[in-house]
Amino acid sequence: MKLKRECLKMMKNPMNLRSLSLKTLRNLGFVNDYDEFDLARVDGLVRSAVAYAEKYQKAEPDSYQKDGITENEERAIIMLATHYYESPDGGAGGLFSTETSGKATWNVVHRLLYFDRRLRI
């Protein structure tokens, strides 16, 4: 168990909200054509996605800031923030054009977060 915790520690990267926001904008297709409004909106969506991920993993608030995040957690946060942007009403709009694809997004996010869940010992 100690070895697993040490391995997970080595795999984690420091979390930078601005970096996650820029990666989310890139994921949405904004390369260089975004303004401060888009960036501020995505910043809020990324913060919401981080809060959701921490709650889903039953982690302490701001634990991602303190401990860093794994690649799977980063992917889940970017995917969730992208989904929030594409589907502001909570439905399956934008690129997620069917109800099943919206559900598939949530399933993938949950599985990515489940792989690296933070266990309390």
Image (tube, helix red, strand yellow):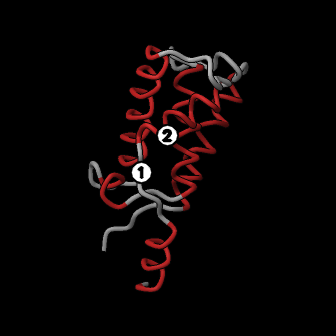
Q: Inspect the image, locate mark 2, and give the three-letter code of the amino acid beneath it.
A: Leu
Crowding around mark 1 (Cα neighbors within 10 Å: few <14, some 14 to 19, many 20+) is some
> What residue sits 43% from the left and 79% below the top?
6
The residue located at (53%, 49%) in the rendering is: 74
Q: Position of residue 58 (x, y in %)?
A: 35, 54
Secondary structure found at label 2: helix
Q: Residue sitting at 47 percent across and 64 percent down?
A: 12
Name the residue: 72% across, 19% down: 97
- Which quadrant, please, contains the N terminus? bottom left
Q: How far across and down, in percent of the image, does residue 3 sit?
A: 46, 85
How dense is the environment of label 2, judged by Cα within 10 Å: few (below 14), some, or many (20 and up)?
A: many
Residue 9 placed where, x, y %?
43, 72
- The tag earlier along the polypeptide, 2 or 1, is 1
Cβ atoms under marks 2 and 1 closer than 8 Å:
yes
Q: Quick one: SS at disc 1?
A: loop
The furthest residue to the left: 61
Q: Is residue 76 above or below residue 59?
A: above
Q: Nearer the viewer, residue 97 or 40?
A: 40
Q: Residue furthest front?
A: 32
Q: Using the image, tell me which numbered label, if any, was put on residue 15.
A: 1
Q: Quadrant of the C terminus?
A: bottom left
Residue 98 pos. (x, y %): 72, 21
Inter-mark Cα distance, 2 to 1? 8 Å
User: Which numbered marker is on residue 85?
Assistant: none
Residue at which label 2 appears? 20
Question: In the image shown, does 45 or 108 lie closer to the viewer?
Answer: 45
96 shown above or below 23: above
Q: Decide: is 79 above or below 74.
A: above
Amino acid, disc 1: Met
